[in-house]
Amino acid sequence: MWDSIWINAHLATLRLGKYGVIRRAALAVEQGRIAWIGARADLPGEPAQLAREVHDCEGRWITPGLIDCHTHLVYAGNRAREFELRLQGASDEDIARDGSGITSTVRETRDASEMELIRASSARLKNLMDEGVTTVEIKSGYGLDTATELKLLRVARLLGASGAVTVKTSLLGAHALPPEYQGRADAYVDLVCAEILPAAAEAKLADAVDAVCDSGSFSAQQTQRVFAAARALRLPVRMHADQFSDSNGAALAARWGALSADQLEHSNEAGVRAMAEAGTVAVLLPGMHFFLRQKQLPPVGLLRSHGVPIALASDCNPGSSPSGSILPMLNLACTLFGLTPEEALAGVTCHAALALGLGATHGTLEAGKVADFALWNIEAAAELAYAMGGNPCAGVVKRGVEVHRPD
Ligand code: DI6
Ligand code: FE
């Protein structure tokens, strides 16, 4: 007897990165895992005889639960004023003089209580869950001192405590230089490696370590110090790479066996080839690209030809992607980066799972995998990337239990 069975549904399994459609299908769950999946006609009996609970999906579609594998979702305040100034042509210097910019988010986030951060962040998280998200990666990076970086990671853990969504945390101490370390980047990297990282590891608050390796951020040498410290603590790494310039970040990420290299607008072919050989996933951030009106496109053709899995994410952050929304990213990835709707859906399911080291248990609808899936009021899987706005999500199932119904 299975715990539950879901019938009268069309499935997009995303096996091997393809839609893998099964029409008029059934999906059975046992102890939070998918126990059986296939055409209803092939079921070994009547649903009510096979499972304790029968869910009639009334012809809806089911996909793996969506995975947002790159967010900076926990922060205080917003940067709407900066957005206005930028549209009026303000430079970074003007923005800094105005007291806006990343420093303003750091200031407000340091001053905010954990409860205030939970309140602000759970609203953004609810938005993602409304859109079918069952797993989310949350970075620190707006504290840039030990106490606040740990506060951000604790808030991220608390956001996942209910079990309605899986939260994977990344310590991003090497996000930017805090005001008190201006001009002393090496000294700040000392703090990240000798104090912030060990404290987060000790408290088991970080599932991975991230760093921004780019001109205007941290150098390859500084990034490698952070990665060496992470490796010594047995924490996997990921990287923000080549956003504004080709710093050979993609190759560096591959050399350190990074789970993912993210952004990649200016990455070169050698870097892409190294990622393919190392199994490092490419995470593209179309929302950031659009919001910053970037011109240089990430090397999608090279990623395809070298067989690098392409994931997509919201990059939810106040400065370059103020979007607590994942569905528009599928459309932007198609319209801006030339992905197919199938590649876009694989980007927020199976490939996003790989980027979080969850490929064996999440990201596809297959027997044995964790029964995280979403139900959709759509006629075809391509509609998830096709629609500009609106939310066709009809329900979210976590470990076989319906945990969320969008408003
Ligand atoms: N690149 C980005 O676009 C964000 N972080 C990063 O490394 C921007 C962060 C911010 O401006 O708040
Ligand atoms: Fe980011």
Image: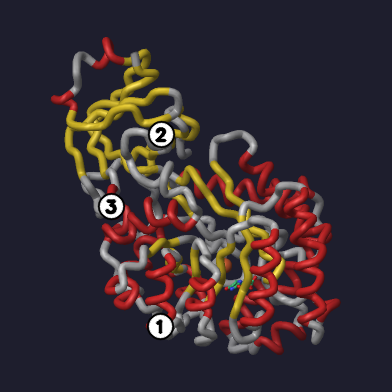
Label 3 or label 1, whichever comes before in sequence order: 3
342 versus 300 height, above or below: above
Q: Residues within 10 Å of mark 2 (few under 14, many from 20)?
A: many
Q: Quadrant of residue 362?
A: top left
* Residue type beneath disc 1: Ala
Badge nearest the viewer, 1 or 2: 1
Tag shown at residue 16: 3
Quadrant of the image where one finds ligand 2: bottom right
For mark 1, what is the residue?
Answer: 270
Question: CB of mark 1 within 8 Å of CB of mark 2?
Answer: no
Residue 340 is situated, as x and y percent measured from the top left of the image, at 26, 64
For the residue with label 1, is its CB less than 8 Å from the closest atom of ligand 1?
no
For mark 2, what is the residue?
Answer: 371
User: Circle 2 — which element?
Assistant: loop
Label 1 or label 2, whichever comes before in sequence order: 1
Cα separation, mark 1 vs mark 2, equals 38 Å
In this orientation, does residue 95 appear?
yes
User: Circle 3 — which element?
Assistant: helix
Residue 279 is situated, as x and y percent measured from the top left of the image, at 42, 64
Q: Residue at x 71, y 89 (%)?
A: 93
**Residue at the right extreme of this rendering:** 180
Quadrant location of the N terminus in the rendered image: top left
Q: As rendered, which of 239 and 62 lies closer to the eye?
A: 239
Q: Residues within 10 Å of mark 3 (few under 14, many from 20)?
A: few
Left-right relation of 12 to 290: left
